[in-house]
Amino acid sequence: MKSPREPDLELRGKLIRSLGALREILPGSFVERKRACGRPNCHCADGKRLHAQYQISVLMDGKPKALHIPVEWAKKVREKIEMRHRFDAAAATICGVNLKRFLKEKEDRPA
């Protein structure tokens, strides 16, 4: 006999299954900056059409560090960092479901 549907358990299972690609996760924040390169004849010299520069900002050994990201890696790196944000949100939801279930179990426990 199948147990009655428990939406919290279904949500928890769905979130856990969605985290399958964690081996690709990256910490930090993705940063896109615009800058002039300094060459006087470049299109960026007028200050209007600046070059894009990509970085990730991370803590390394407890200190903030900005790491340069090549343009061709930008999309992939951004996705891996966004994965970290999804992971954090999923972990918070899973913990909330587990706490709710724990408190209910504790409440239902015979004295």
Image: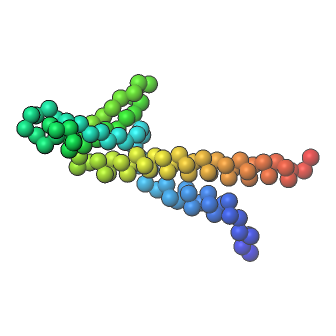
Q: With 94 as the anchor, is 57 left or right in this view?
A: left
**Quarter occupied by the N terminus:** bottom right
Quadrant of res 65: top left
Does 50 sit left or right of 79 as displayed?
left
Is 99 drawn above or below residue 20 in the view shown? Answer: above
Question: Is residue 69 at all visible to an observer of this figure?
Answer: no
Which residue extends farthest left? 41
42 vs 109: above or below: above
Closer to the camera in the image, 41 or 33: 41
- 40 and 92: which is toward the camera: 40
- Kindly identify the residue that appears in the image at 49 percent across and 54 percent down: 19
**Residue plotted at (63% across, 63% down):** 10
Residue 90 on image: x %, y %? 56, 51
Residue 45 seen by the camera = yes
The colour style of the image is rainbow
Q: Position of residue 24 (x, y in %)?
A: 38, 49
Locate residue 99, reporting x and y percent.
71, 47
Q: Is residue 97 left or right of residue 83?
A: right
